[in-house]
Image (spheres, grey):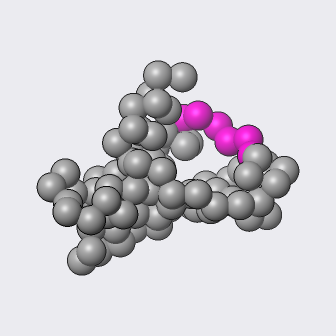
Amino acid sequence: MRLYVQQASFAAALDDVCKRISKNNVNPIYGGVLLRAVNYTLELTSTNSVRSIRHRIGAQVEEPGEIALPGELLSKSVGRI
């Protein structure tokens, strides 16, 4: 997966989807954010097993793909760039 996206848009979308992540989950998948890049869109998805949220932002996608990453770690990393 290779893409280009504005940092401010990505940080705002990530902040939105990370609000659904519970800090006390037994199942680690509920602490993650799924990133899916296709066409001209980056889609971020998270869930807390009861509700899920999906946020889409514009992106220049050179290689489509998807990956699930720990939401808290990803959020901290994006804020430092």
* In the displayed structure image, the side of residue 5 where residue 81 appears, left or right: left
Return the residue found at the far bottom: 50
Can residue 16 be seen by looking at this rendering?
no
Vertical comparison of 57 with 45: above or below: above
- Region rendered in magenta: 3-8
Q: Residue at x 68, y 53 (%)?
A: 58
Q: Residue at x 51, y 57 (%)?
A: 68
Q: In x, y percent, where is residue 31?
A: 32, 56
Asked where in the image residue 10 lies, by quadrant, the reply is top right
* In the displayed structure image, the side of residue 10 where residue 2 appears, left or right: right
The one nearer the camera, 2 or 29, is 29
Asked where in the image residue 41 lies, by quadrant, the reply is bottom right
Vertical comparison of 56 with 5: above or below: below
Return the residue found at the far top: 80
The one nearer the camera, 1 or 58, is 1
Q: Residue at x 68, y 42 (%)?
A: 5
Q: In x, y percent, where is residue 1?
A: 73, 52
Q: Quadrant of the C terminus?
A: top right
Magenta span includes 43 = no
